[in-house]
Amino acid sequence: DIQMTQSPSSLSASVGDRVTISCRASQGISNYLAWFQQKPGKAPKSLIYAASNLQSGVPSRFTGGGSGTDFTLTISSLQPEDFATYFCQQYHGYPLTFGGGTKVEIK
Amino acid sequence: QVQLQESGPGLVKPSETLSLTCSVSGGSISSYYWSWIRQPPGKGLEWVGYVDYSGSTNYNPSLKSRVTMSLDTSKNQFSLKLNSVTAADTAVFYCARSVGAWSPWDYWGQGTLVTVSS
């Protein structure tokens, strides 16, 4: 199985801060990576696919980058609605696997 | 707009079979891949498996011996059966769609909590 490791597992930040979350794959996955945002009691919402492509309707303050084994999700200016948990997920190999999540909390 | 809606019993007894259905509206169930993903309370996400438009399946090896998925094109639904459940199977179950086996999910259901308890 391809292991996905996210860091940090949680972070505290203020509105307006720039935030970067990392995701590392245990083997190369090219750009077969997605990022999701999840709020309590809600289904995950797709933010980014193919490592750097923004889903329709997602604000441009979200940016994805990386290829191979190392990936990042950056929020350029954190907004109140961005406080949530973020997951990365690879779809390069089966079984499909997720990172453990990064909880973004209000400082 | 494509919408997915999970349905099924919210409580299942240990050793019994968990059965869920995902109803798809706003689009055909044909020509896509349909996955189940689960999330134990307070924990991360786990892909359970998929059934594709032809009825072919691919399951997570960790669950393969207990999982069956199928498609009902006449009802535009697909289903999940997980047998011999234990408390460790308690989770929110989501259904989701992708356009191919190596494509991201583009639509998700809202999720349904299934609790395994006597």
Image (spheres, rainbow, N blue to C red):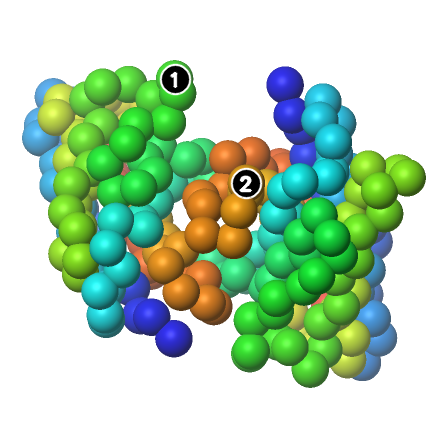
Q: Which mark is residue B21?
A: none
Residue toward you, B2 or B100: B100
Q: Is residue B32 above or below residue B45?
A: above
- The residue mark sitting in front, 1 or 2, is 2
Amino acid marked by disc 1: Gly
Q: Which disc number belongs to residue A57? A: 1
Q: Is residue B63 left or right of residue B41?
A: right
| Residue B52 appears anywhere in the view | yes
**Local secondary structure at mark 1:** loop
Q: Nearer the viewer, residue A102 or B26?
A: B26
Rendered residue at 89%/38% (across/down): B75
Q: Please tell me which residue is depicted at 83% across the width and 71% down the height of the picture.
A: B17
The answer to whether A42 appears left or right of B114 in the picture is left
The chain that hosts pointer 2 is B
Viewer-closest of B85 and B100: B100
Question: Tag 1: Cα neighbours inside 10 Å, few (<14), some, or many (≥20)?
Answer: few
Say which amino acid is labelled 2. Val
Residue A42 % position (x, y): 53, 37
Asked whether residue B118 appears in the rendered view, the answer is no
Picture quadrant of residue A2: bottom left
Residue B63: name its quadrant: bottom right
Indicate the position of residue B105 as horizontal and vertical percent values.
Answer: 50, 42
B11 to B66, vertically: above or below:
above
The residue where tag 2 is placed is B99
Residue B16 screen position, x and y as percent: 84, 75
The residue marked by circle 1 belongs to what chain? A
- Name the spot of residue B6 as percent of width and height, x first: 73, 43
The N terminus of chain A: image quadrant:
bottom left
Q: Which quadrant: the C terminus of chain A?
A: top left
